[in-house]
């Protein structure tokens, strides 16, 4: 379904979207988008009409900006589509829901190759397909006159299937803290790309196309998770959201987290110098899920206990050391800062 | 609720969003957003959870780019918020639905005053409030490194209240074509601003804050409208969408449309030179609604018959003259072209 293409397509002036035009572009992109199982009216009208089987709809928006969240010479169009979809689908999963549809707002320069946008559509379609989800609408406009960068704003919708949504504010003292998915792989891949390397492949791939543990979200909800969020800002920062919103403290176990230093992390850290635990604790964009469960809950497959909730609202600590201190000792910031 | 502010706030370095930071900014903006009647989980979690009373949800996305769809020296922050919301709420109305919630993806330079974004939030909240709708989520990120422009991608959700959605493809030969709302006022205001004038106020206001006839959408659905869309690209272009998607022809009545040359249009056209009918036929962004109804339908309040549907799929004509020719004779393009 996804044809391989070079990362930076050879520019064909006749294929620039300014030449193809809005309606030609929309037709070409929609032809690749698949169709959403819940769609009663799909793309091409003023709005889509989607069935909401649960009687409620889950909705979130995430923005990706070229030069900040991706680079067209580091990621293929398909990679960018996968990544933009994954960032949103993980937020849906983090509520305990299953994705149903995406809407895409896109600002791009008039010389953007239409074939590049087809690649983005392919990547999104592939990321959505396992759920029967698809892009059901959106808008494509020219970038600001002062910009030659792509801005991609994706809205994901999802269905709870009768589950109670798992919020960030329900953690209770005595709960266990657990994580599902990879930690630090995307940050490791970004470190590799920044130094100009293109290997190891596993690290690069993790940065280009995160693989969030989507099924772990609804499974956690079914297992009684008391709070949950995705780790788009990094584990320490996102566990901090659960602690702050729930009015509790979280103590993480360093030895358990050290076991997440796997795959390409040890090798890359040794080559570049530095402690790979920094990526595990502060690296965002893997979109792992972090949740709290009652101490008696049977954790679903894929979840690993990494700490405990206590009643002293002192934020997040690792073996009793405050998160900011731990991050500083590892040479990392405390998390992703969007305007830093 | 909306405090008046100068169009371009005096820059206060301490109030730049790069200084205020993402979480400070989110807190300030959300404090102004009101709450959506359908929200079970509002902003601040991974995703919002919204009731969908109809069992279906209507969803659409529209992108506004600074320098293309608005200018910060021509429109206040509140104006931009009103306009971004209105463009999306009109699409919801054009399906026969009532808006319930907005999600906002925002890319803006780090030196953007936080007070400017508060103004945008105020404008959106005010435009949504009559429906019990509100902003329920979103994402704010720094603009691309090469850009000092704001990009605003808004997704609107709506509820059909049991109505069948009114699509673009249901017009039948013999139907009447009707319009609700103003035509050409926004284009007239833009023409005034482009010449450096700041009057007449009615034209400027129409460009800054369109006033779509929201209630006319569900009313048209209840009255049996066979097709409908909003006129964001201009009447000729958008009637063309109904004709093309329905496989019919549409003939509009020039004398009836001439009666839409009202308000500031005659005066401004006389001052600037040109035929104000050009704005009526090709001006976008007023977000009037155009629809077709069975010939026996009783048209709801606010709808005016402007033409007829026939079975010759010849696109849109005005008194038998093809739309492109009519537009060219009036010195206007055939509609809004996004990459022109």
Image: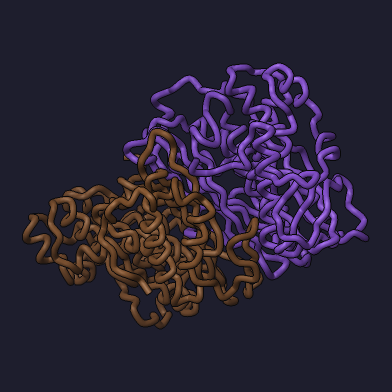
Chain colours: A purple, B brown
Q: Quadrant of the N terminus of chain A?
A: top right
Relative to B17, A271 lies left or right: right
Does A42 appear above or below B304?
above
How many numbered tags mark residues here? Answer: 0
Relative to B316, A29 lies left or right: right
Quadrant of the rendered image containing residue B211 = bottom left
Quadrant of the rendered image containing residue B183 = bottom left
Residue at 57% over, 76% down = B161
Q: Nearer the viewer, residue A157 or B140?
A: B140
Does A20 appear above or below A43?
above
Quadrant of the rendered image containing residue B136 = bottom right
Does A152 appear above or below B100?
above
Residue at 35% over, 59% down = B80
Q: Position of residue A85 (x, y in %)?
A: 62, 44
Q: Position of residue A183 (x, y in %)?
A: 74, 38
Q: Position of residue A131 (x, y in %)?
A: 73, 49
Q: Position of residue A235 (x, y in %)?
A: 71, 44
Q: Nearer the viewer, residue B287 or A320?
A: A320
For the question of whether residue B181 can be seen, the reply is yes
Q: Nearer the viewer, residue B246 or A53?
A: A53
For the question of whether residue A128 can be seen, the reply is no
Does A273 appear above or below A79?
above
Residue at 84% over, 34% down = A259
Residue at 66% over, 27% down = A189
Relative to B118, A267 lies left or right: right
């Amino acid at each position: 379904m996804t044809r391989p293409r070079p990362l930076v397509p050879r520019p064909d002036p006749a294929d620039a979207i300014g030449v193809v035009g809005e309606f030609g572009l929309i037709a070409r992109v929609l032809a690749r988008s698949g169709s959403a199982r819940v769609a009663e009216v799909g793309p091409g009208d003023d709005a889509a009409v989607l069935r909401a089987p649960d009687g409620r709809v889950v909705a979130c928006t995430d923005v990706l900006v070229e030069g900040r969240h991706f680079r067209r010479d580091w990621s293929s169009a398909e990679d960018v589509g996968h990544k933009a979809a994954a960032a949103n689908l993980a937020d849906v999963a983090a509520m305990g829901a299953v994705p149903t549809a995406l809407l895409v707002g896109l600002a791009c320069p008039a010389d953007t190759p239409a074939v590049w946008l087809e690649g983005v559509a392919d990547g999104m379609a592939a990321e959505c397909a396992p759920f029967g989800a698809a892009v059901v609408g959106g808008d494509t406009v020219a970038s600001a006159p002062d910009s030659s960068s792509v801005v991609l704003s994706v809205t994901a919708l999802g269905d709870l299937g009768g589950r109670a949504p798992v919020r960030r504010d329900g953690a209770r003292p005595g709960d266990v803290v657990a994580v599902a998915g990879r930690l630090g792989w995307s940050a490791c891949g970004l470190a590799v790309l920044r130094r100009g390397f293109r290997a190891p492949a596993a690290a690069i791939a993790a940065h280009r196309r995160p693989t969030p543990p989507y099924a772990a979200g609804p499974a956690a909800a079914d297992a009684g998770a008391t709070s949950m969020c995705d780790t788009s800002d990094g584990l320490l920062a996102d566990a901090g959201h659960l602690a702050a919103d729930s009015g509790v403290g979280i103590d993480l176990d360093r030895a358990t987290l050290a076991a997440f230093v796997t795959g390409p992390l040890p090798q890359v850290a040794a080559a570049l110098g530095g402690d790979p635990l920094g990526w595990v604790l502060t690296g965002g964009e893997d979109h792992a899920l972090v949740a709290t469960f009652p101490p008696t809950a049977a954790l679903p497959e894929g979840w690993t206990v990494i700490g405990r909730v206590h009643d002293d609202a002192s934020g997040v600590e690792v073996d009793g050391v405050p998160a900011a201190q731990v991050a500083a000792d590892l040479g990392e910031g405390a998390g992703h800062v969007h305007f830093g």
